[in-house]
Image (cartoon, helix red, strand yellow):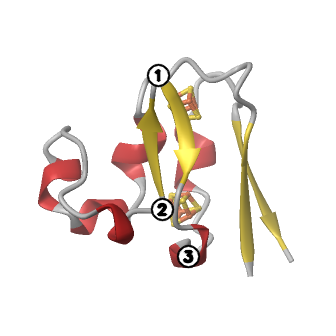
Amino acid sequence: MYRLVVYKEKCHGCGNCVIVCPVNAKDPNVFGGKGPEEEDKVVVRVVNGVADVINEELCGGCGACVEACPVYAIKLIVE
Ligand code: SF4
Ligand code: SF4
């Protein structure tokens, strides 16, 4: 089980975590830099300028989002 925590006070909504996530990338719209086609198939997206974890259960725990965040605003917890 993986948990994702976004430190909203640090996040500036760049979307790096959204783009690099391999689960999100299955949605062609996300891969192209737009919003997701279907909300229930992405793990994280930017809502109102801040990253938001919307389907944590889909996360595969790869850590790419953590690596891609320039301000250490997203954390992966393995339980
Ligand atoms: S840990 Fe990997 S699968 Fe999970 S949200 Fe981050 S990039 Fe996506
Ligand atoms: S969590 Fe980091 S990578 Fe994701 S949108 Fe916020 S600042 Fe960008």
Q: Amino acid at mark 3?
A: Gly
Cα distance, mark 3 to mark 2? 9 Å
Outermost residue toward the right?
79
Q: Position of residue 28 (x, y in %)?
A: 13, 59
35 sits to left or right of 63? left
Describe the element under mark 3 as helix, strand or loop: loop
**Label for residue 39?**
none
Q: Please state if 26 lies on the left or on the right of 72 as rendered.
A: left
Q: Are marks 1 and 3 in contact (CB under 8 Å)?
A: no
Q: List the residue tagged with mark 1.
A: 49
Disc 2 within 8 angstroms of ligand 1 (CB): yes
* Residue visible at 59% across and 43% down in the picture: 67
User: Are the residues flagged by discs 3 and 2 in contact, CB closer than 8 Å?
Assistant: no
Left or right: residue 34 compared with residue 45: left
Task: Indicate whether 32 appears above or below 37.
Answer: above
Give, as a three-letter code, the residue at label 1.
Gly
Whether the residue carrying mark 3 lies under 8 Å from ligand 1 is answered with yes
Instruction: Give how far apart the Cα atoms at labels 2 and 1 are.
Output: 16 Å
Mark 1 or mark 3, which has the lower sequence index?
A: 1
Identify residue for label 3: 60
Going from the N terminus, do you reach mark 3 or mark 2 first?
2
Q: Tell which quarter ligand 2 is in.
A: top right
Residue visible at 74% across and 82% down? 1
